[in-house]
Structure formats: structure tokens, C-alpha cells
């Protein structure tokens, strides 16, 4: 099928499970999307990422426009061919990364002028340029160019920023053009103010998108404030389209977001924390650097099917982490990505079976406090 479409299969309370169909493959929702910032999920081969169960991964406009440039990736056949990932790719629009990474930034209605954090070269990102870059990359799901206001911000600043992002959403839609089989997602802003979130959702509905993201969260507001927004914001978005919560999160953030109607999420946490020895398990977080693992012959998580848990002891994982061996990042990243995909599969099954409440209960009971 050369179309982009979304089918809801079942709901349980506000939790939903379904399927996004794209020409490059289907995406089971709720979905967790590993982050492949610079055309690689760090320390993972693409076939290993696929083996964890990921149906889609993230690329990044900001990083790839700087190095190796979108034009070069286009000349080489596009991002899928370049990084040997033939399943769907979602690319973020770059605005968020400019604000968190680039130096010397100048904001205007036109867009953002900035200097590269790599070599100091001058660049400009606008809605039109962001659409052009994401098209050159060949990404299947394109994100509108938006601004995610940094906290702390007054309600007036959040309102002004959201309204500019909505003008940029219209420009993104106009520049995206007609690309069958590809999707453009709008991004809701409005901070933690319900009226602003409603105004943003209304504007996005008017413009019309193939999917809708909840932006402006996971920027330090804390889980309680984030869940407070998620108690109403997803419902403001069209219920027959995918809802994507950007930049989230820890396992309990993810379960809470799915319970509030979110279908897609992305986060660097599983891969980044894998490299720092923070391992997610059903019983909580294991810090493999801790000396108490040095003689432990047990697997990290006997219920996990990943290579680290199937073929190695905690003692080995502790050793290669301490020695900073390359295999450490590979095994620990694979485990964390596998844990996240198994968590998503567990939720998809529970929602389909109407047992999501029990899933949530078991999830929280199993997680002991601190290291285990
Ligand atoms: C971590 N918290 C957080 N991330 C946000 C992100 C980035 C999501 N992750 C992108 C990948 C990470 C590197 C390559 C792509 C956000 N992005 C946009 N466009 N708008 C947000 O409001 C927005 C809000 C976000 N909050
Ligand atoms: Zn494992």
C-alpha cells in the first residue's frame, strides 16, 4: 500500500493500541522509537535495533544538516539507504536541538540563525528549510518546524512562542507539499496552560495533519506537571490520528503516557543510559558499575531475551563496563532497547486484552526501590 494510514485496534480506558501503515512498513502502537541522531543508534547495528522489535527509529535534521549535510545523504540515495535501515524513519524538525545544542542563536519570525556546535559554521533553519532537509533525507514522518520554549517561561512568553509555532506549522504544511505515503505531524505547544494547549490544538486541526505531537514537555517540568498536561492535552487532538509525545521518557513516564492516550514516544534515555551502566529491568534500575555485581553469576534479567541476558553474567557486564570495553556499550544498549520494546509489547497486549489496569499495577509492584 502506498498510503500512510492509522487504524485503532482496541482501547482500554484512555489507552489505545493500533497500527500505523506506511509504504516502508507497519508501526505497532503504542510504539517506542529509538533515537538514531547522527544516522546511527549508537553502539547498535541496524539489524540489532530491528531485532529488539523496533518498527521505526528517529533521525535528526539538526545533526544531519551539519554533518554530513542533507544534500550529501540525498546524493547517496537517502537516509534509509545511507544507514541501512529500510523500515520507517521519523525525523525531528531541528528547532528543539538548535536551542539545546547550537551556539550563537538568533530567533526571528523567519526562523533561527545559529552557528554549528561542530565547526562554528553559520546556518539558518526556517520551516521551509526544515521541510526541504527532511525531504532530502527521505524521512517517512516529518515534524513541523516549531519552537519549544525553555523553562522557566511566563504564560505570556509561552503564548507568544506557541502562536509563532502555529504560524510555522502553517508554513511547514505549505512547504511540505503533496507527498503520498509520507506524513507531516503538527506539534502542539502551550506549556502547562490548558487554554493555550486548546488554542494550539484548534489551530493544528484547522491546518490538518496526518498525526499530532504533544510538544513542549519533558523539559524539566517534572512527571507530575507532565501528567497533569497529559490528563487533558491528548484528548484535544483528533482521536483517529496518531498522538506522539516527544522526548519521553523513563519507563514509568511511558506507562503513564500510554494510560493517558499517547501512541508514540521517543527518548535517548535507553541508549544513553546504557552507555553509562544504568540498566532497566522489571524490578527497577540496576547500576552495573556497582562493585556488588563483580562476582554475580546470574543474568541481569532472566526474563529478557537480549544477548546480554541470554549469554552473559552480571559479573561479565560489570567487568567490561569497568574496563570500558566496546562490547559494554553494545550489550548494555541492546538490553535497554530490548527492555523498552518488551514494555511496549506488554502494553499493546494488555490493551488488546482489556487488562491494562492490571498491567499498570504489576508494573509498579515489581519495581523495587533503588538498585536490585
Ligand atoms: C527530552 N525532552 C524533550 N525532547 C523534545 C523534543 C525532541 C524529541 N526527540 C528528538 C530526537 C532526539 C535527538 C534526535 C531526535 C522536541 N522536539 C520538537 N520538535 N518540539 C518539542 O516541543 C520537543 C520537546 C521535547 N522534550
Ligand atoms: Zn536483556
Image (tube, helix red, strand yellow):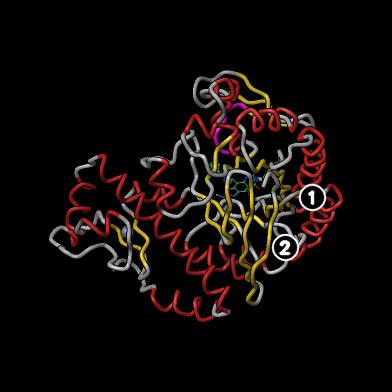
Q: Residue at x 57, y 29 (%)?
A: 78
Q: Position of residue 327 (x, y in %)?
A: 25, 43
Q: Is residue 123 left or right of residue 201?
A: left
Q: Position of residue 320 (x, y in %)?
A: 20, 47
Residue picked out by circle 1: 159
Q: Decide which of tag 2 and tag 1 comes sooner along the chain.
A: 1
Q: Is residue 297 magenta?
A: no
Residue picked out by circle 2: 233
Above/below status of 178 relative to 266: above
Q: Position of residue 127 (x, y in %)?
A: 74, 33
Above/below status of 189 relative to 343: above
CB at disc 2 and ligand 1 closer than 8 Å: no
Q: Residue at x 65, y 50 (%)?
A: 152
Camera-side residue of 14 and 251: 14
As measured in the structure, the alpha-carbon distance from the residue carrying label 2 to the one carrying label 1 is 16 Å
Residue farthest to the front, as pictured = 1
Camera-side residue of 85 and 31: 85
Camera-side residue of 175 and 352: 352
Residue farthest to the left, as pictured = 295
Q: Residues within 10 Å of mark 2 (few under 14, many from 20)?
A: many
Q: Position of residue 139 (x, y in %)?
A: 61, 37
CB at disc 1 and ligand 1 closer than 8 Å: no
Q: Residue at x 68, y 24 (%)?
A: 124
Above/below status of 59 relative to 292: above
Report the span colored magenta: 100-104
Q: Is residue 340 left or right of residue 148?
A: left
Q: Residues within 10 Å of mark 1 (few under 14, many from 20)?
A: many
Residue mark closest to the camera, 2 vs 1: 2
Amino acid at each position: 500500500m502506498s498510503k500512510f494510514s492509522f487504524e485503532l485496534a482496541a482501547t482500554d480506558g484512555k489507552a489505545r493500541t493500533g497500527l500505523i501503515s506506511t509504504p516502508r512498513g507497519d508501526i505497532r502502537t503504542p510504539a517506542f522509537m529509538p533515537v538514531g541522531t547522527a544516522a546511527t543508534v549508537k553502539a547498535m547495528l541496524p539489524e540489532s535495533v530491528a531485532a529488539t522489535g523496533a518498527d521505526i527509529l528517529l533521525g535528526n535534521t539538526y545533526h544531519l544538516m551539519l554533518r554530513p549535510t542533507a544534500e550529501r545523504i540525498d546524493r547517496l540515495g537517502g537516509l534509509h539507504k545511507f544507514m541501512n535501515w529500510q523500515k520507517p524513519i521519523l525525523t525531528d524538525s531541528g528547532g528543539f536541538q538548535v536551542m539545546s545544542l547550537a551556539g550563537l542563536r538568533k530567533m526571528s519570525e523567519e526562523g533561527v540563525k545559529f552557528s554549528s556546535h561542530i565547526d562554528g559554521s553559520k546556518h539558518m533553519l526556517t520551516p521551509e528549510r526544515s521541510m526541504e532537509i527532511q525531504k532530502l533525507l527521505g524521512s517517512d514522518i516529518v515534524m513541523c518546524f516549531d519552537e519549544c520554549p525553555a523553562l522557566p517561561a511566563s504564560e505570556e512568553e509561552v503564548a507568544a512562542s506557541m502562536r509563532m509555532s502555529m504560524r510555522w506549522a502553517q508554513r511547514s504544511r505549505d512547504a511540505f507539499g503533496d507527498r503520498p505515503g509520507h506524513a507531516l505531524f503538527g506539534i502542539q505547544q502551550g506549556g502547562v496552560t490548558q487554554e493555550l494547549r486548546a488554542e494550539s490544538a484548534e489551530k493544528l486541526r484547522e491546518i490538518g495533519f496526518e498525526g499530532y505531537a504533544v510538544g513542549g514537555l519533558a523539559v524539566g517540568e517534572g512527571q507530575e506537571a507532565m501528567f497533569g498536561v497529559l490528563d487533558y492535552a491528548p484528548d484535544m487532538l483528533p482521536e483517529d490520528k496518531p498522538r506522539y509525545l516527544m522526548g519521553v521518557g523513563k519507563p514509568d513516564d511511558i506507562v503513564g503516557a500510554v494510560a493517558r492516550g499517547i501512541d508514540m514516544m521517543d527518548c535517548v534515555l535507553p541508549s544513553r543510559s546504557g552507555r553509562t551502566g544504568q540498566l532497566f529491568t522489571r524490578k527497577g534500575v540496576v547500576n552495573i558499575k556497582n562493585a556488588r555485581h563483580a562476582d554475580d553469576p546470574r543474568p541481569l534479567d532472566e526474563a529478557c531475551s537480549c544477548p546480554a541476558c541470554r549469554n552473559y553474567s552480571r559479573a561479565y557486564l560489570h567487568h567490561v563496563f569497568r574496563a570500558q570495553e566496546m562490547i559494554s556499550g553494545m550489550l548494555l544498549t541492546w538490553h535497554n532497547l530490548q527492555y523498552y520494546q518488551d514494555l511496549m509489547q506488554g502494553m499493546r497486549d494488555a490493551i488488546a486484552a482489556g487488562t491494562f489496569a492490571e498491567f499498570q499495577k504489576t508494573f509498579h509492584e515489581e519495581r523495587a526501590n533503588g538498585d536490585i
